[in-house]
């Protein structure tokens, strides 16, 4: 979907799955699109009515830092990467 959106002129992809699609970052880099990485514990649209964390801030931070590293490894520049703590924060 990101590939089609970028070909139509989109320049930002907002991925609520936390880059769950292994091709997502490659496609973003190919189009030089910016990305938004969102923290998510489960898959999108799967209810998580009582999320439990030992360290909420630490776990969300670690998740998002990992997604930033993945995006950079795919060829995206830091200024192309935004992070979203998601619904749990």
Image (cartoon, helix red, strand yellow):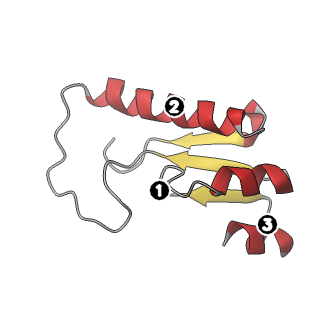
Residue drawn 67% across the image and 58% down it: 13
Residue at mark 2? 66
In the image, taking residue 47 as reference, residue 79 lies left or right, namely: right
Residue drawn 78% across the image and 34% down it: 77
Residue 9 at x, y = what percent? 85, 70
Residue 7 sits above or below residue 82 on the image: below
Q: Answer with mark 2 or mark 3, whichever residue precedes in sequence.
A: 3
The span from disc 1 to disc 3 (Cα, nearest Å) is 19 Å
- Asked whether the viewer can see residue 21, the reply is yes
Residue 29 sits above or below residue 45 on the image: above
Residue drawn 55% across the image and 46% down it: 37
In the image, taking residue 24 as reference, residue 3 lies left or right, namely: right
Residue drawn 66% across the image and 73% down it: 1
Residue 24 at x, y = what percent? 64, 56
Residue 74 at x, y = what percent? 72, 40
Q: Secondary structure at mark 1?
A: loop
Number of residues whose C-alpha sits closer than 10 Å to that of mark 1, classed few (under 14), some (14–19) or many (20 or more): some
Q: Quadrant of residue 88?
A: top left
The span from disc 2 to disc 3 (Cα, nearest Å) is 25 Å
Q: Secondary structure at mark 2?
A: helix
The span from disc 2 to disc 1 (Cα, nearest Å) is 14 Å
- Asked whether the viewer can see residue 9, the reply is no
Residue at mark 3? 10
């Amino acid at each position: 979907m990101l590939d089609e959106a970028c070909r139509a002129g989109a320049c930002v992809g907002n991925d609520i799955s936390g880059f769950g699609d292994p091709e997502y970052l490659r496609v973003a880099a190919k189009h030089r699109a910016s990305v938004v990485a969102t923290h998510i514990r489960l898959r999108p649209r799967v209810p998580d009515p009582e999320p439990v964390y030992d360290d909420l801030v630490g776990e969300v931070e670690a998740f998002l830092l990992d997604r930033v590293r993945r995006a950079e490894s795919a060829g995206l520049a830091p200024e192309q990467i935004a992070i979203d703590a998601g619904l749990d924060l």
